[in-house]
Amino acid sequence: MAEILVLGAGLNGLATAMLLARDGHSVTILERDDSAPGADVARVWHNWQRPGVNQFRQLHFMLPRWRTLVQQELPTVLEQLIAFGGTRVNVLEELPSAITGGRRDGDERFDTVTARRPVLEAAAAAVAQRTPGISIRRGVTVTGLLTGRGSVAAAPHVTGVVLDGGAVLPADLVVDATGRRSQVGTMLESAGGRTPYQEREDSGFVYYARHFRSADGSRPRAQGTLLQHFNSLSILTLPCDNDTWGVGFITSGRDKQLRGLRDTSAWHAALKLYPTVAHWGAAEPITDVQVIAGIEDRYRRFVVDGEPVVTGLVAVGDAWACTNPSLGRGASIGMLHACALRDLLRDVGPDQPEKLVRRFDEITESTVAPLYRMTLAFDRHRLNEIAADVTGETYRTSDANWAMSKALYAAAYRDPDVLRAYASVVSMLCTPQQALAAPGMVAKVLTLGANAPQYPTPGPDRAELLSTIAANQ
């Protein structure tokens, strides 16, 4: 069994460490932020500081795919999350029965357990802390990579890390789970390695979000899907833990006219314009309007032109690839990626460093890279659609996949079978191709959705939205 360093004690880092430790590896987690969560949920939300995670108190939701994986692989994490007040949600049953057609056998696949990000991470940390084979060291800054020469010409072999102050920690394998802000690529260059292949750009979205708390223990009932699209913006309504929930506007970063949503009064006035989500704001707010922008789309690959640029190092989850989080796929992709690494290490150990990095690259490209590409394609189309809304035009594209996704979304509100297909896709339980492969599904989607209104749920036109924001600032 190997000595493994996991860099980053976020959700994906903790999950990776637990999976590897359960297989008998000795795992040390190194986390730059120095404070630990503790077990007091209220203090976790209000007091736990994670400056290394800029979206720490932003909107979060755990998809049914994540719940399925964690229930199978790390069930104690789900138990701890529920003990901390995590909410059991069925994403289909949240909707009115007039839309769902009532409960059916198999709908349990849409079950999940969700919470705010600090509570999620605190639950995972509590389980990791008591997992044999794991040591968590907080307040430790990794400044460089300890390297030697491996079997690949000109590719450094990572044998550990260098800490702030010059101390070194050796390892058989280093796993980068430091998330969106990973600096490992820069460290690799400083160690004399080739630059990893990278695609990087601003995702183009801005979030304006608030969290609320129920006064009587009830939660708003959904009148539409968790993510709803409207003229020139989208809105998220997400159940959280301990009778809380989050609501967020998602706009284009180029849309300066909607920056008035930073103002609390304008934010609430705008929310009231949308009948299917307005009631989510009728409760006690527990945050001001929280804004997050400059969210990066980034994809990295450590095999370039068929050759590894490094051995002894792999990256998982957001440290490998990240995109706009509005579809909520990050944790599910990260869990899939962590399971893939665990499974690979059962066959290929760190003592075969070149084979390990090559095989992990292949597995990454075949299992999780398509999910990243699919998310990125959706985001690019949605940004273009918003840009057209702003100018009063209709967005047109020759991409048949986008046309089908629009038809699927619209038809989901009009047919229970299509709704379940749509919910399976957004829950990451299957791909769009798999969902549409059901007998008669394509014909039904096209009949009900192809000529539907651009936005199937009611909302204001852009002029009304802008005038409302301006009048309430």
Image: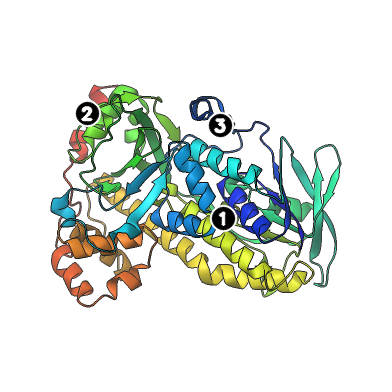
Task: Name the residue at 71% across, 70% down.
Answer: 356
162 sits left or right of 431 in the view: right
Estimate the x, y position of residue 71 in percent, counting from the top left: 47, 56
The amino acid sitting under disc 3 is Ala
Question: CA separation, marks 2 and 1?
Answer: 40 Å
Mark 1 Cα shell of 10 Å, populated few (<14), some (14-19), many (≥20): many
Question: CA separation, marks 2 and 3?
Answer: 43 Å
From where the camera sits, is residue 253 visible? no
Estimate the x, y position of residue 469 in percent, counting from the top left: 26, 28
Answer with the quarter of the image where residue 412 lies.
Answer: bottom left
Q: Nearer the viewer, mark 1 or mark 3?
A: 3
Judged from the image, the secondary structure of the residue bearing numbered disc 3 is: loop
Task: Name the residue at 26% across, 34% down.
Answer: 280
Specify the quadrant that holds the C terminus: top left
Disc marking residue 39: 3
- In this picture, is 149 found above or below 211? below
Closer to the chain start, of discs 2 and 3, is 3
Disc marking residue 317: 1
Residue at label 2?
A: 468
Mark 3 Cα shell of 10 Å, populated few (<14), some (14-19), many (≥20): some
Specify the quadrant that holds the N terminus: bottom right
Estimate the x, y position of residue 156 in percent, counting from the top left: 81, 63
Residue at the far bottom: name it. 439
Answer with the quarter of the image where residue 142 lies.
Answer: top right
Estimate the x, y position of residue 207 in percent, counting from the top left: 40, 38
Judge by depth and name the residue closer to the eye, 439 or 40.
40
107 sits left or right of 254 in the view: left
